[in-house]
Image (cartoon, helix red, strand yellow):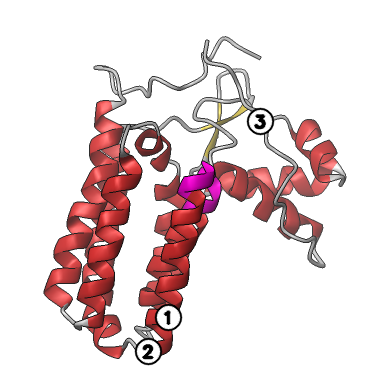
């Protein structure tokens, strides 16, 4: 059985007015940043203690995430993180390709000087995260980098849907981060993207992004056994 990792208490978002919202944001961060692994059991009581709130808003958050497809109930009615599969990765990243290719048509020509300055800041943040071995920080800066572009499109609904799809896609980055040299490939793409964005070259941006997304999908396939189950999943017979 693979060793289970316990969600960390660090880098929690500040509690907003709604405790249910706070629980949802925190558990979603644990999923997105790899502190909760595919197949891992989630205990509401343990999370409530970690968040210093009652189990009621935690259970509400877990129901919400189950409805979104991030969690599932096993035959013993225990809540677990859904396993990752190559087929699901293919579907999620195909959806990303469709939306991102379309949104770049309006976003890239609308980019301004302040947007490029922001891209440079997030690029530097990713570099610092790599040096410090902070994958969670890299993942946050990576997402922010791309959403600088998406947000410039002025297409609010498309940005909302991309947020949902990126939440679903984030769990698949775990396989990528276990691949030697992943940071070299990703940062090379980010550098090429900055150049293409500054040139206003939509076709080049979409070509680079196709290669960028393919790296994660390829890593998911490579990390999966012949029956399609991720090698890092937690044995279902565990607690």
Q: Are marks 2 and 3 in contact (CB under 8 Å)?
A: no
Q: Earlier in the sequence, mark 1 or mark 3?
A: 3
Residue shown at the point (37%, 24%) measured from the top left: 230
91 or 112: nearer the viewer? 112
Disc 3 marks which residue?
Answer: 42
189 or 168: nearer the viewer? 189
Q: Are marks 2 and 1 in contact (CB under 8 Å)?
A: yes
Rendering coords of residue 164 (x, y %)? 45, 59
Disc 2 marks which residue?
Answer: 113
Residue shown at the point (79%, 65%) measured from the top left: 16
Q: CA distance from mark 2 to mark 3?
A: 45 Å
Disc 1 marks which residue?
Answer: 117
Q: Secondary structure at mark 3?
A: loop
Q: Secondary structure at mark 1?
A: helix
Q: Is residue 134 left or right of residue 150?
A: right
Q: Answer yes or no: is residue 161 visible.
A: no
- What segment carries the magenta color? 130-138
């Amino acid at each position: 059985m693979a060793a289970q990792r316990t969600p960390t208490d660090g880098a929690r978002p500040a509690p907003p007015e709604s405790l249910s919202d706070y629980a949802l944001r925190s558990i979603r961060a644990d999923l997105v940043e790899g502190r909760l692994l595919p197949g891992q059991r989630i205990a509401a009581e343990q999370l409530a203690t970690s968040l210093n709130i009652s189990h009621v808003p935690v259970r509400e958050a877990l129901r919400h995430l189950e409805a979104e497809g991030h969690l599932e109930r096993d035959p013993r009615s225990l809540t677990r993180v859904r396993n990752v599969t190559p087929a699901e990765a293919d579907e999620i990243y195909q959806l990303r390709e469709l939306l991102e290719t379309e949104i770049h048509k309006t976003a890239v020509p609308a980019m301004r000087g302040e947007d490029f300055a922001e891209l440079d800041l997030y690029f530097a943040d990713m570099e610092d995260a790599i040096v410090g071995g902070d994958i969670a920080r890299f993942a946050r800066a990576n997402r922010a980098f791309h959403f600088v572009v998406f947000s410039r499109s002025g297409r609010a609904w498309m940005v909302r849907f991309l947020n949902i799809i990126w939440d679903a896609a984030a769990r698949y980055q775990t396989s990528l981060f276990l691949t030697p040299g992943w940071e070299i490939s990703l940062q090379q793409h980010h550098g090429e993207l900055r150049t293409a964005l500054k040139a206003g070259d939509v076709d080049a941006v979409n070509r680079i992004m196709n290669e960028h997304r393919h790296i994660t999908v390829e890593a998911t396939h490579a990390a999966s056994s012949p029956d399609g189950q991720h090698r890092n999943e937690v044995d279902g017979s565990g607690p």
